[in-house]
Image (spheres, rainbow, N blue to C red):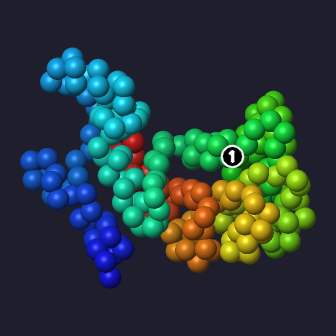
Amino acid sequence: MDDYQDPTYILHHLGEDDLPNNAVSPPIFQTSIFCFDSFDAFRDALTSEENHYLYSRGNNPTVNLVERKIAALEHAERAKLVSAGVSAISAAIMAFVRSGDHVVCVKDCYSWTKTLLESYLPRFGVEHTFVDGVTADDFEAAVRPNTTVIYLESPTTLTFKLQDIEAICAVARRRGISINALVASVDAARQGNLSSALRLFVLECYRSGELAPRGAQK
């Protein structure tokens, strides 16, 4: 197995060959801003913030390392860490909708997903339909010509219902619709053939135990 596909290598070694002061574990950088050797260096960073450590909202060494590891585990091009689930959900859905579009969403979703779809997005002309989601047919029946997103949660919030991710992805691909899926684990995403979908993971609950990753968020 190639090192970059080996989970043990990814978790314990990827990006950790040159840690500051030969640290055994990656340090947590809790700073909000970073300093520069000269004004010219600072000005260069301002013009290309995505490529520099300027403000931790954009780039932070700890967060970037976690993102790199998650992307490698997912066999994905990139990963983006955010501080709250509703931030990830909102960004994932809003990236694919505009006025006049329609979202199909599993009924037993996270409460703030419902708030986004029922209270916020309608103000901008985005419609939605909630479905039980027991079968892929539920989603296909709800699809309209203006549907741009199918949103899944597997398992669903509180009721822990699972969706047939692979079958629903097939519906989405057939209809040219984006899939956003909040899934419990990497294994679930791979089994569901989510290679072309935008996957959301709750790190605190499913990756390392409730509240464990918060040190990297502060």
Q: Which residue is mark 1?
A: 96
Task: Give percent across and percent down for residue 98.
Answer: 75, 38
Q: Is residue 46 above or below residue 89?
A: above
Numbered disc 1: secondary structure: loop
Residue 31 falls in image quadrant: top left
Extreme-left residue of the structure: 21
In the visual, does 24 lie left or right of 86? left
Estimate how packed mark 1 is, as few (under 14), some (14 to 19) or many (20 or more) residues with alpha carbons within 10 Å. Answer: some
Residue 116 visible to the viewer:
yes
Residue 200 falls in image quadrant: bottom right
Extreme-bottom residue of the structure: 1
Task: Say which amino acid is labelled 1.
Answer: Phe
Nearest the eye: 102 or 85: 102
Nearest the eye: 211 or 155: 155
Task: Give percent across and percent down for residue 175.
Answer: 80, 63
In the visual, does 61 lie left or right of 49? left
Q: Is residue 64 above or below residue 56?
A: below
Residue at 58%, 77% in the rendered image: 191
In the visual, does 183 lie left or right of 209? right
Residue at 39%, 64% in the rendered image: 72
Nearest the eye: 184 or 175: 175
Task: Give percent across and percent down for residue 208.
Answer: 41, 61
Residue at 41%, 67% in the rendered image: 73
> Which quadrant: the N terminus?
bottom left
In the visual, does 202 lie left or right of 150? left
Residue at 35%, 47% in the rendered image: 64
